[in-house]
Amino acid sequence: PEERAVFHCRGCWTVLGDSLQLCGQETPGLSVLVCFKVTSDVTWEDSLLVGLEGALLGCAYHLLSCRSCNLAVGFILYSSGSDLAHLRGLFCFFKDSIICYCLKNQMIIEASKVNFPAVTLKE
């Protein structure tokens, strides 16, 4: 892909993943980057949380954290309604917790301002 980037923790700049691992499109109501693989600096607890509001209302998920600074950086959806079923078991980074370093132009950009090409699990 033309637009390659490395995903960093907003809190401490630890590398959490990259755009080669993107595997899904942003879901309406959720501002996330969906990846099938992350670095070992992304951790999660075995315990499940339950969404009490917003797009994750009623969903069970594992919270993802940065190993270095413990900032919450995303989630792994465990159970959900059919509208979010395609995200189950994938790593979803909160765009507001991630900074992107774009390799082509060597710029640091807010994840919410980067548009990655459409990808699906089939690709």
Image (spheres, rainbow, N blue to C red):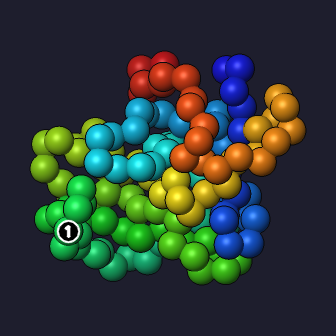
Give the quadrant of residue 49.
Answer: bottom left
Disc 1 on helix, strand or loop? Answer: loop
- Residue 43 in sight in this render: no
Q: Which residue is mark 1?
A: 53
Q: Residue furthest right?
A: 106
Q: Residue at x 71, y 20 (%)?
A: 2
Q: Residue furthest front?
A: 113
Image quadrant holding the N terminus, namely top right
- Residue 98 in sight in this render: yes
Relative to residue 84, is residue 116 drawn left or right?
right
Give the vertical position of 105 relative to 79 (above or below): above
Which residue type carries mark 1?
Glu
Residue 52 image position (x, y, % from top left): 19, 73
Are there few (<14), some (14-19), or many (20+) residues within 10 Å of tag 1?
few
Give the quadrant of residue 47.
Answer: bottom left
Residue 35 image position (x, y, % from top left): 51, 43
Total labels: the figure holds 1
Q: Residue at x 45, y 49 (%)?
A: 32
Q: Residue at x 29, y 48 (%)?
A: 29
Give the vertical position of 70 relative to 117 (above or below): below
Relative to residue 37, is residue 122 drawn left or right?
left
Give the quadrant of residue 79.
Answer: bottom left
Residue 74 image position (x, y, % from top left): 46, 62
